[in-house]
Amino acid sequence: MKNIELKINEKFVEILRTIEPEKVKLVSLLCELIECEKLAVYRRLRSDMPFTFAEIVKISMHIGISLDRIAGISDQYRSQPYNMFWQDYFNLTDVDYNMSGDYIKAINFASKCPHSEIGIAMTTLPLHAMVNFPNLYRLYILKSLYQLGSPNEPVPYSGIVIPSRMINEHKLYNKAVREIAYTYVIMDEYILETYIRDVKYFQSIRLISKNEIDIIKRDLLNLINCVEKIATFGAYDNGKEVDLYVTGLTFETTYTYIYSDSVTVSMVDAFTTGSMASVDKDACDHIRKWLRSMKRTSTMISSSEKNRIMYFDKQRSIVENML
């Protein structure tokens, strides 16, 4: 038993050193997390005294390390763990925000890797990306409340107020993912039509007014302009590389992975505003392999001026004709 505990501790220390090579920073972080003196942390890093299970769990949750990875578990026939992350609009708690914060911290760690990578295959406009367009963001909250219920249903579009703390969390997420070295996004070719159909439905049951339709239309056109700018330069404003693709192949929901030497995160969207997330490396590898294969059946619009112009002109036409 002691040999197993020693191996687990050595593996854990090895992973920690990979994530944060600078010993001073690593020791400072661990002192804060497990609330002990530097000498005690150094003893743990030398394996003179093993980390307790509770300490390993707490550190792993903060940094984004899979316990399976620490234990060396790898089985192709074993189902991979995903945690459901869904925010109750009327009852947001510290647990909700702490869970979100843990994934943001994991992404920040991943961005330190010079060849970190994020891949996204999206069927709908991503919720976190809508934070700079609150009028578009509000539709997702409206849809979630309408489908899952609320204390005073139905809540009209005009009654949706996004908590400032939720907005801040999404802004932190956006900032973190934009520090990843390379991003590629594969968009369903009907992504805007899907969003607009939802808008039209809620207008038909009088939860969205004609004036609000005009506001949504304006923000959709502004969103198209912003995405076109990224596609034109093939990068975010900070210079991090971005490739955009469009696919005609259908897929069920939005998939995301973040990959680096030290941290892996994969997410599957669910229930409009929710997602299932995992820091398991095997789960990330599976989604990464699948998304990379989708590139072969997609059209890149960030490298071809003709394809890019045709695509974004078509999106503007869709917005003008459908709204």
Image: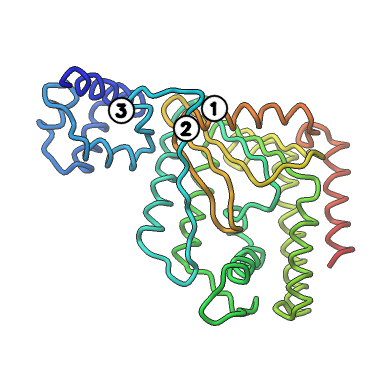
Q: Earlier in the sequence, mark 1 or mark 2?
A: 2
Q: Dot 1: within a 10 Å radius of its alpha carbon, few (fewer than 14), some, or many (20 or more) residues?
A: some
Picture residue at 46% right of the left edge, 23% below the top: 75
According to the image, label 1 marks what residue? 285
According to the image, label 3 marks what residue? 16
Q: Earlier in the sequence, mark 2 or mark 3?
A: 3
Distance between the Cα atoms at labels 3 and 1?
Answer: 20 Å
Picture residue at 55% right of the left edge, 36% below the top: 257
Q: Dot 2: within a 10 Å radius of its alpha carbon, few (fewer than 14), some, or many (20 or more) residues?
A: many
Q: Which is nearer the eye, 159 or 316?
A: 159
Asked whether disc 3 touches disc 1, contact meaning CB atoms under 8 Å apart, the reply is no
Distance between the Cα atoms at labels 2 and 3?
Answer: 14 Å
Callout 1: SS: helix
Image quadrant assignment for residue 67: top left
Asked whether disc 1 touches disc 2, contact meaning CB atoms under 8 Å apart, the reply is yes
* Residue type for callout 1: Asp
According to the image, label 2 marks what residue? 264
Q: Against 264, is 169 above or below?
A: below
Callout 3: SS: helix
Picture residue at 65% right of the left edge, 67% below the top: 139
* Residue type for callout 3: Leu
Quadrant where the N terminus sits is top left
Q: Nearer the viewer, mark 3 or mark 1?
A: 1
Callout 2: SS: strand
Q: Earlier in the sequence, mark 3 or mark 1?
A: 3
* Residue type for callout 2: Thr
Percent of width and height locating residue 58: 27, 42
Percent of width and height locating residue 189: 80, 45
Picture residue at 40% right of the left edge, 51% below the top: 99
Q: Nearer the viewer, mark 1 or mark 2?
A: 1
Q: Dot 3: within a 10 Å radius of its alpha carbon, few (fewer than 14), some, or many (20 or more) residues?
A: many
